[in-house]
Image (cartoon, coloured by chain):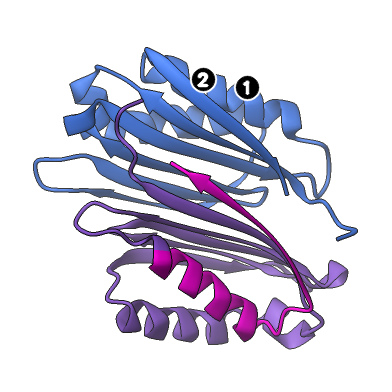
Chain colours: A blue, B purple
Amino acid sequence: MSYSPGLHVLGSIHSEQQQLLSVYQGLQTFIDERLSHYELNKLGDYYHSFDNAGFTGVVCLTESHIAFHTWPEHNYLTLDIYLSNYQKVNDEKSRALFEDCCAYFKATAVERTEVKR
Amino acid sequence: MSYSPGLHVLGSIHSEQQQLLSVYQGLQTFIDERLSHYELNKLGDYYHSFDNAGFTGVVCLTESHIAFHTWPEHNYLTLDIYLSNYQKVNDEKSRALFEDCCAYFKATAVERTEVKR
């Protein structure tokens, strides 16, 4: 494989913030602000709340995608941040945005995997 | 981390099919049919074509998500299939759907990574 589009950071995150794990609207606002801060370009997004449970959110970017899936009943979420380097190298932005999301959820434990795509 | 929601299969795929890498509508139809076949539940999707280039597609599922990013100029795409096991174990469906997508794009080379979430 000659082409290497970018870095994908995958996280398994423990959080005891039931409200943050159950209601996506605050996260959606937070992500939109962070994307603006990092000069990343949102094409569209899709969020869905499950009844009496967590939510799922995917954000489609010019630079690839972000995805959240939460399980408040397990104090748990997974996070994907995958930014391609089409016009500039975004690896450090992937890592910084990952840390921002851990701070948003007040993470108490994080398992993190990096995959070069 | 005590909770383990499911399997995420990440792929870097080489394809020489310029049309398939450039136009998402055929893939969207194909994915919808495959989701029905595997009894997976689409909540919503978002596809975007770049001018004179590839496309991006994210599909939000009850069972997590699927994402495509194509670069026809590099004969290349990346693929993510992440199915959680909320009601049943979907690991084999993740792998089967991954193979279906490789067949759809007539892949000539595949690099594949599995991450247990």
Dot 2 alpha-carbon crowd within 10 angstroms: few under 14, some 14 to 19, many 20 or more: some
**Figure quadrant of residue A112:** top right
Give the CA distance from mark 2 to mark 1.
6 Å
Dot 1 alpha-carbon crowd within 10 angstroms: few under 14, some 14 to 19, many 20 or more: some
Q: Which mark is residue B100?
A: none
Where are the magenta residues, as a range?
Answer: B92-117
Residue at 55% x, 87% y is: B26
Q: Is residue B109 magenta?
A: yes
Instruction: Inspect the image, locate mark 2, and give the three-letter code of the amino acid beneath it.
Output: Asp
Q: Residue A47 location in percent, x, y?
A: 33, 49
Which element carries disc 2, helix, strand or loop?
helix
Left or right: B104 in relation to B41: right
Q: Residue B9 location in percent, x, y?
A: 54, 56
Q: Which residue has dot 2 on it?
A: A100
Return the residue nearer the eye: B41 or A24.
B41
Left or right: A10 in relation to B110: left
**Figure quadrant of residue A103:** top left
Q: Is residue A38 visible?
A: no
Return the residue nearer the eye: B74 or B46.
B74
Instruction: Inspect the image, locate mark 1, and give the three-letter code of the amino acid beneath it.
Output: Ala
Q: Mark 2 and 1 residues: CB-CB less than 8 Å, in contact? A: yes
Residue at 40% x, 19% y is: A104
Q: Which residue has dot 1 on it?
A: A96
B73 vs A107: above or below: below
Which element carries disc 1, helix, strand or loop?
helix
Q: Residue A65 location in percent, x, y?
A: 56, 48
Looking at the image, the residue that sits furthest to the left is A52
Numbered disc 2: what chain? A
Return the residue nearer the eye: B27 or B97.
B97
